[in-house]
Each structure stands twice: as structure tokens, then as C-alpha cells.
Image (cartoon, grey):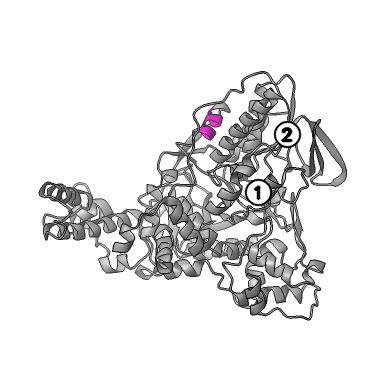
Amino acid sequence: MTDFANEKLTRRSLLTAIGLAGGTAAMYDAMLSMGYAANSDFTGPITLQGNAKDASVVILGAGIAGMVAAYEMRKAGYKVKILEFNNRPGGRNWSLHAGDSYTDIGGTTQKVDFAPGQYFNPGPWRLPYHHQGILHYCKMLNVPLESFVMYNNAALVHSANAFGGKPKRFREVAADYEGHISELLAKATSQNKLDDQLDKDEKDGLLQMLKSWGALDKNYEYRKGDQSSDFRGYDVPPGGGLQAGPVPSDIMPRKELFNSSLWNALYFPKQWDFQGQLFQPKGGMGEIGKAFGKLLNGVIQYDCKVTNVHQDETGVTVTYIDSKTGGAPKTEKADWCVNTIPVSVLSQIPMNVGPKMRAAIDSLPYLPAVKVGLQFKRRFWEEDDNIYGGNTYTDQPIFNISYPSHGFFEKGPAVLLGAYIYRSGMRVYNFEALSAKEQIEAALEQGSKIHPQYRAEFMNGVAVAWHRVPWTLGCSGLWNDALREKHYADMCAVDNRIVLAGEHCSHLMAWQEGSVLSALDAITRLHKRVMSA
Amino acid sequence: MKTRTLLLAAMLSPIATGAMAQANRNQFPQQGGEALYKGICQDCHMPDGRGAEGAGHYPALAKNPKLAEPGYPISVVTQGLKSMPAFGGAMSDQQIADVVNYVRTHFGNTYKDTVKPEDVKNAR
């Protein structure tokens, strides 16, 4: 440990080491945990200076990046046209409601049999307060936002290998770790074991802090009692009138807790991406895409499968066919092109760009991810367990259960996120390879270990495995440091008349904020070129 | 150094339970060609190996002439190709040999030459 403590590890060298040791999945986990993958530099709405004088631009993809580009370029005087593969705007900004259906690339169709008003976001689902770019467009589009509950002290932490597989409340796990750690540190301090590092004033200050922060008793010990129960909750909470007084709860034994992996869940509320306040659009994340689509009415042509992108000195010609019926190829010509097609798909489409951009497009794998939405007859998590929104974590493959942040106390069916699998190493691929039916069954089976009510209350579900989504072939670009160093700049550079945009052209992997910032940056550079042409 | 980097990876990773768990979860547990195919490959190439078509496509493995030369599938599985992820770090030589042999003898493919783990090792 001394060796480790003395070693000067930069964040980059650490990431490289992790990449070598654990492969891409470990690297991605590490990048997320270090907050490296998500910094928004949005400083306000952009204005493209100088009139484009009817220069034309064809934009490929009506996702967030494509629609931001279209809106801003139209404002600057461009003639704008978007070609979109789907028959709706939004791309990965997408919610499934009652009556919707989803057909994956293998031809499996799932009908969404939710109650009216219920929905499930297969893609993005939360907006951190510091993602000011996407929040700006929500405000501009009058998309009403509500609170997204990320952290709930009453939500659960579960490990199949700890405490007999019995889930614990977040408040219990957090209080007991902090209590036990505080007691140990207080002991070391008062037994003078840290004297080479702390002077007397520091020791006094630290002990005072530990007593309060760790809920220690007057002997600086973490014990069952009023202090600890005030943090972790009571067996019998304080009552009124002649009811029994509060009965404190048992704390988890230090050894069993420290031997568990429950600490893993405590990391989430600490991470910048997931710190409150977070938001969600009322009625589903897809409301942003829908509102953008309305604003760009007439600009977007749906059901277009792009088959070729060709540029020469006179402009860009995009060839496409009807994505549903095929048929004869058609073309769309413009002076410039903003291409937001995910490179997992774009790598298969002929496009005459330089070798550097081509190498970048061909180099980037896409993150595997699965989400399962489950509809239950009632909100048993609220009614039986007092859990109102927030996230439960488990070391089972389903990883994450998320309770709806809307419709609190409502009677009748409700949909929760029954699995969100993206950071479980190679298990994600194994889960993706299951059929949708098997994914729903696995979510039920594993979720039952946490909520025994699952089987009796279950109505129906929807599962989306992102490698089988026909228009993305994966969830999001999966950069690592080595790939980024080699290809990122070439991916983002303007290649004659073509520029790429999307979350894959950002440092905010899989976040809509990345799509916004990438689009704004790409069109700013493209516009500069147009103005100087 | 190796122990330390594994430990660091485990420390930074939110759902690992230690260095061993971290190592394991980045390896596929499936053994044998069929289990590997069903556990991984069929996600995109489909249970019957026919591939699939959307905005982009997943190539068919059924009767795919590119499988005639075993070096090609070994390289694609190990190093990846475009949207196909590289699985070389997540699978042993034996696992890669097994899954390549499975694909080359199913879905209408009847290649007789068998890939050995050494072939994979040499191709890495």
C-alpha cells in the first residue's frame, strides 16, 4: 500500500492501466466513476454569425444532434433538410407508451400493453442539472420538466452474497459504513496512532466531526442506539401519545458489512453525473424529440435509409431508399452535410471521406446495454415498502431497478425500470443475447429476490437490447483513452463538405448533452468554412 | 504491477467485489462452441446465423464464404471489425477456437479443418 500511495498516478495513466488490465468494460466503468466521461461545457445558446444566404445543408438523422443542427442552421439562413430512418423524430430520445410497438433487428415485435399514461424510456432517462445544453432546448421547446429521483435513502442495496441475500436500505448501508469507519478512525486518533500526521487541534476537530458524521455515542463508538438509529432508521419509529417510544434498530456487524460489496452502491449519489438535482420530461424522455420534430415540421423526411453519401467540388449527394419498402433509390443534394448517423451504422455506408475520418468511423465499437420495463398491478414499492422513486442496486446481472419519479400515490398499474444493464462486464453481452421474453423473465426472477411481490403483481413488460436496435446497432460509442487519442480528432474534423455529430463525437458518452454539444461545435466549425468559402 | 492494476480496477469499479471478481466479469464464463454462440454471437447474428438488416446490417454466418479461411473469423472475433466488438480480451484461445469451429460447422457450413487453440494464440 505504501508503494501505491507514493506512486504518482495521473488519471490518464490510471485509465491506461485499467484498460490493459480489465479491457474496455473495466475502462468504461472507471471512466464513469472518475467523472472523466461527462463534462458539459455549454455556455449558452450559439449564434452563427453571418448569413448563409440560402446555402443548403442535408442532415442525416433526426436525433437530438441532427435536430439541434437543423434548428440552429435554419436560424442562420440555411436551407435545411433532414433524412431520418425511423418514422418519428428523436432517435435514441424515445419513450414507449401504451399502444406503441417495437420491432428489433431480428424481427421480434413487442406490443406495449401499458395502462394509459404509463411509459418506459429504453434510452436516455435523466437530465443532470449541469447538462445546460439539453436543458436549454427543453426550455426553448416548452417541454415541461419534473424532478427525477436519483437517490432515495429508502431504496435498496442488494448482494446475493451478503446478509443472506436480504436487501438493505440505502440509509442503513450508508450509516453503517460511515459509523464503523468513524469508530475505527476515532480509535486510531485517540490512541495516538495518527500523531505523525495530525496535530492536537486537528485531532480534536476530527474527533468532533467523526462523532457527528458517524453517529458515534459518547464513547466514540458506533452502537445500537438513538444516534445510530437517527441515521439508519428505527425498528419502531417514534410515535405519538401513549404509543411505545422509539425502538432502535440493530446495526450490521462490521465484519459482515466490510466483507460485502454493498459499498459499491454508495458511489452513485456521490458522482457528479448523478448528484441532485436531476430532471425528466413529463410524460417520458421522448417528449423532447416530439417537440423538436414539431418545431421542424416539414424539414424532416422520415423512413429514409441512407445507402450512399458522395461529396465533390459542387456539393453532397445522399442516396437513400424507403426504409420500410425499399424500392428505387432517391437522392438529396445539398451544399453541405451534417451526418449524425451512429458510426456503428455509418461504417457500413459508402461515403467518400479521407482515410483518417474513415479509420475513425471504422474503429469505434458500441456499448452493449439492455433495459427492461415492467408493469405491475400496483405501486407495491410505495404502498408496502415506502419507496417513492429512486434507484435500487444489486450485484445480479439486472444491476439497477428504478422506481418511477412521477405519479406518486396513484392507484392502478405502474411501470418501473426492472433492469438496466450496461456496466456488468461481459455479462451485458450474455444478457443481450437472450430473447426479449427471456430478458423479461430474468428481470422478474432476479427482481423477485429483492421484491417478493414481483410475481403476484406482474402484468407485462418490454425489453430493449441495444445491439438489436435496427437504427443504432448498439447503445453509444465506446471510446477508451487509446482509441480517443488515435481517432477522436479525425472523427470530429470537417472533411471537405461533411461533418459528423452525435454523442459519439463528444466526451459525454451516451448522454444527450454530448449530442447537443457535439452538434453545436460541429455546425460552428462547418459554418466558419461556409463563410470563408 | 499486474496485481496492483487489477486491484485499482476493482477499487474504481462500482460493482466489483474484489480483484478476482473484476477479472472474472471481464471473461465470458461460457465453455464450448454452442454455449458461446448462444451466449454472445446470436445477439446480433441471430439464433439461426442468418444475420439481420436494419439501418445497417449484421452479416449472415450461414453459408458465408468468408468463413472458408479460418484466419478470417479468428481475426474478427479477436480484434473486432467495425461495429463488431473485439472479444480477444474476454475469451481464451480455447473459447475462440471453439466458437469459430462451431460457426464453421453449423448453419449450413461444413468446413472440415478444425481450428486449434494454438492457431488462435499465433493469430493474436
Residue A360 is tagged as: 1
Task: Name the residue that disc number 2 marks.
Answer: A497
* SS type, badge 2: loop
Of residues A450 and A183, which is closer to you in this image? Answer: A183
Q: Position of residue A215 (x, y in %)?
A: 20, 53
At x 43% / y 70%, what residue is drawn? B20
Q: Amino acid at mark 1?
A: Ala
Position of A471 compared to A329: left or right? Answer: left
Residue A472 is tagged as: none
Most extreme residue toward the right, as rendered? A328
User: In the displayed structure, would residue A329 be above or below residue A431?
Assistant: above
From which residue to which does the magenta span run? A133-139
Quadrant of the rendered image containing residue B119: bottom right
- On the same chain, marks 2 and 1? The answer is yes
Q: Quadrant of the N terminus of chain A?
A: bottom left
Of residues A71 and B98, which is closer to you in this image? Answer: B98
At x 50% / y 61%, what residue is drawn? A454
Mark 1 belongs to chain = A
Q: Amino acid at mark 2?
A: Arg
Mark 2 belongs to chain = A
